[in-house]
Amino acid sequence: FADAPDPHAVLTPVAGNLHAWAVEDGATVEKGQVIAIMEAMKMETSILAPCAGIVQISKEPGGYLEAKVVIGRVEAAD
């Protein structure tokens, strides 16, 4: 089970630059809400919340990231 994907992890969908977060750290979001923007080959890709909850940002915008890098988490609200 160690290889099971974390359903709360926010992953980069493609390799590129983390352009911006659309929400603040600690913001409450809904599943499917746009929470960040990646930029790759001059195209922007929206990163959606994997579940409803509270955003915890672990990577700041700027710099190149590979695909499938964890950039944050969405923790379920109590």
Image: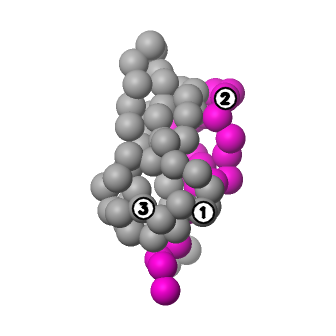
Residue 55 as seen in the image, left or right of residue 50: right
Crowd tier of the residue under label 2, counting other residues whose Cα lies within 10 Å: few below 14, some 14–19, many 20 or above: few
Q: Image height check: is 35 above or below 56?
A: above
Instruction: Kindly report the distance in space between the C-alpha atoms of the residues bearing marks 1 and 2.
Output: 20 Å
Instruction: Kindly report the distance in space between the C-alpha atoms of the residues bearing marks 3 and 2.
Output: 23 Å
Q: Amino acid at mark 3?
A: Val
Q: Earlier in the sequence, mark 1 or mark 2?
A: 1
Q: Which residue is mark 3?
A: 29
Specify whether residue 76 is painted magenta.
Answer: yes
x, y percentage for residue 78?
49, 86
Q: Which residue is mark 2?
A: 62
Q: Picture quarter containing residue 14?
A: top left
Residue drawn at the location 45% of the way across and 48% of the way down? 35
x, y percentage for residue 47?
41, 43
x, y percentage for residue 31?
33, 62
Q: Amino acid at mark 1?
A: Gly
x, y percentage for residue 77?
48, 79
Q: Image height check: is 39 above or below 77?
A: above
Tell me the SS state at disc 1: loop
Q: Which residues are magenta?
A: 57-78
Crowd tier of the residue under label 3, counting other residues whose Cα lies within 10 Å: few below 14, some 14–19, many 20 or above: many
Instruction: Kindly report the distance in space between the C-alpha atoms of the residues bearing marks 3 and 1.
Output: 9 Å
Q: Image height check: is 9 above or below 67?
A: below
Crowd tier of the residue under label 1, counting other residues whose Cα lies within 10 Å: few below 14, some 14–19, many 20 or above: few
User: Is label 3 in contact with label 2 (beta carbons under 8 Å)?
Assistant: no
The answer, for residue 46, to whether it is visible in the render is yes
Residue drawn at the location 67% of the way across and 29% of the way down? 62
Could you say which disc has been placed on residue 26 in the image?
Answer: 1
Q: Earlier in the sequence, mark 3 or mark 2?
A: 3
